[in-house]
Amino acid sequence: MINLRINRLRLAGILLILLGGVLLKTNFMSKAVTTVLWPVLEGSSEGKAVILLVMMGSLLLLSSFSTSNEWLNCRFFSEKWADGKRYLLISILTIFSTCVVGLLTEVWIRLKFGVSIFTIFISMNPRPSTTSIMHSHVFKSVIGYMVSLFGKIAPHNINTGISLIQYTSPFAFIIVIALPLVYIAGLLAMKGMKDTYKLITSFAITVAIIGMIDGGMFSQPLLIGIGILLCVYFAKNPFYLKNLIKPAVIVGIILLTWVAIELGGTNTAYHQLTVINQSEPVNMTSYNVTDVQQHGNKTIYITKPFGSDKTTVESLFKDFNGKAGCMFMTWNFYSYI
């Protein structure tokens, strides 16, 4: 019976990895898979879907081998570490602390340019990319940069955030240590689990890692992943609903913080656009500009709000392409409602 369960995990892992490879190389089932995963991944990004399938599959595959590995049992699972929960705690704490570093990096970027922390940062070169406290791409920029070092070019529809690296370095490089630590600690934690818990944990670790890279502390994948990991960590045998109280409180605090920052930083009266190193004039007629100020290398535009923030940012991508280094824009949460 034990061997049968292990074989099922290996088979599931192999199938997920193969599906991820097929999704990356072809359009076969691409739309169906990304649609199904949309609620979890906070969007229909093909890149995130591939990462989810391949990483979750690798965790299942490797965990099935680790169960019968005597050297691993002796080396990592002796005495007080035998239940694996300490490794799970390492994974959870690493995720939290890394996301905190991401938030501090967002604040540092804005302090460096002397602008409000309640702004969307837009880096223009070589390809427009955005990041903010509410949806951070700080660590995504490092992954994009490392991919470029190996000569790999991501598909045009996948924005690697590489233009942000000049502003997020050096602090964002902590992800180089954090990612393998979360993965390895999570894998070791899965060693003593039943198959059902292995499936749940592998999914949660993968989704949390995706959230770390694309979205940060307040992203949907991060909250889902960390919430599930906390439930697994605090779970007792037999299981009682009260085991969910602590995870719910922790995730609830993060959600309340998200709401407080999102609403507290919202500006419904106007948009303030701070452009750094604008090199050419831009036709701002469509933005309903009410005031323009010049302070050193900063050009500050005050505009009447129109449309959604997403639409405005996309317009800025086009209008300021090749005409500015970067810019900051205040946000209006209600534009999405």
Image: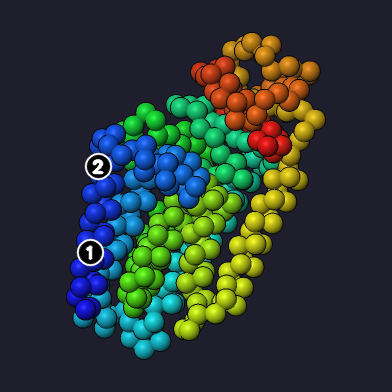
Image position, residue 298 (x, y; %) = 68, 25
Q: Nearer the viewer, residue 51 or 179?
A: 51
Image position, residue 207 (x, y; %) = 44, 55
Q: Amino acid at mark 1?
A: Arg
For the residue carrying disc 2, how many other residues have a C-alpha within 10 Å: few (<14), some (14-19), or many (20+)? some
- Is residue 170 shown left or right of residue 273? left
Tag 1 residue? 10
Q: Nearer the viewer, residue 119 or 222?
A: 222
Secondary structure under tag 2 reads helix
Residue under the image location 69 percent in, 11 percent down: 285
* C-alpha separation, residue under disc 1 versus residue under disc 2: 18 Å
Q: Amino acid at mark 2?
A: Val
For the residue carrying disc 1, how many other residues have a C-alpha within 10 Å: few (<14), some (14-19), or many (20+)? many
Secondary structure under tag 1 reads helix
Residue under the image location 37 percent in, 51 percent down: 52
Tag 2 residue? 22
Residue under the image location 58 percent in, 69 percent down: 247
Q: Earlier in the sequence, mark 1 or mark 2?
A: 1
Q: Nearer the viewer, residue 132 or 176?
A: 132
Up the image or down, 36 lies above or below 100; here it is above
Quadrant of the drawing holding the C terminus: top right
